[in-house]
Structure formats: structure tokens, C-alpha cells
Image (cartoon, rainbow, N blue to C red):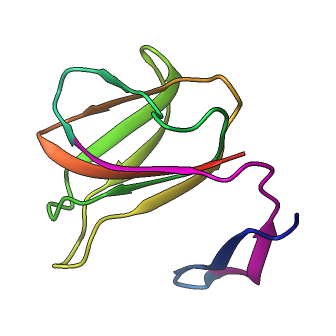
Amino acid sequence: MADEIKLQVSFTCENGNDKVVMSPGQVNIDQTNQGHFDTVVAVTTTEQSVAFTGISTAGQVIIQNLGTAATNYVQYGKTTGAYIGRIYGAKTSQKGTIDKLSWEPGAALYIVGNAAQKVRVVVCEA
């Protein structure tokens, strides 16, 4: 099988005279096994792990902060206390920022917030 996961990518960072654009368009990713995990997690200021139930091997992971406060964020990592990313809430009435990760098989997901908020976690089987 091939190209089961499709990701549309367009990125622009522009600040004054400094600008970079990366727009490869659609990126196709192979998926060996069928299945996905999709949930909304109520995040607090206490670290918690998220178990990817219903799938055997995590492949592509997308995490979105559903909060509407731009100063609130959720940190995530693959080991307890070692966070590798931060996802902020929205600056407007839109949903917050999104991170897409190619997950290391067997790794856990740990999340914690600087305030109570919700995040959506979607994981596709590898």
C-alpha cells in the first residue's frame, strides 16, 4: 500500500524584511496497518500520559491546542519531565496551533499545560 496519509503543508514566516516560505504542497506518507486514535484530552498543570489505545504502532501524530487564550500553552514530550514542544492557544476565536510529528514506535506521549485547556490528539497507525 502507498500514500494512505496525506498532509497539506504550507508555511510562511514573515517579520519585517525577514521572510521564509516552505510550501511543498501535499506530502504523501505510507501506512502499513489500518487504524487511528482520535481523542480530546483535558490538560491540567499536572503532567499526564496519553495512551494511544486501539493501535499497535504509532506513526504520524498531530496535536492541536483547542484553547482560545493565546498565552496558554501545552508542552509535550516522549519521556516524563522532558518536553520537546510547546503548542499555544489561539490568538483569535480560531483554534490554537498544531504540531505534526513522526512518532518513534513505542514512545509514550506526556503532556502538561500552564493552565487548564483541551488538546486534540490524532494518531495514525504506522
**Residue depicted at 38% across the width and 63% down the height:** 97
Of all residues, the one furthest to the right in this rendering is: 1
How far across and down, in percent of the image, does residue 64 sit?
A: 38, 57
Check if residue 20 falls in the magenta segment.
yes
Prevalent SS, magenta region: strand
In the image shown, does 47 or 69 lie closer to the viewer?
47
Q: Quadrant of residue 100?
A: bottom right
Q: With 12 as the anchor, is 89 left or right in this view?
A: left
In the image shown, does 37 or 43 lie closer to the viewer?
37
How far across and down, in percent of the image, does residue 78 sit?
A: 55, 24
Q: Quadrant of residue 43?
A: top left
Check if residue 121 falls in the magenta segment.
no
Residues shaded magenta: 19-41
**Residue depicted at 24% across the width and 60% down the height:** 66
How far across and down, in percent of the image, does residue 119 sit?
A: 29, 50
Of all residues, the one furthest to the top in this rendering is: 80
How far across and down, in percent of the image, does residue 126 sit?
A: 72, 45
**Where 105 falls versus 79 (above or below)?**
below
**Residue depicted at 32% across the width and 55% down the height:** 88
- Mark count: 0
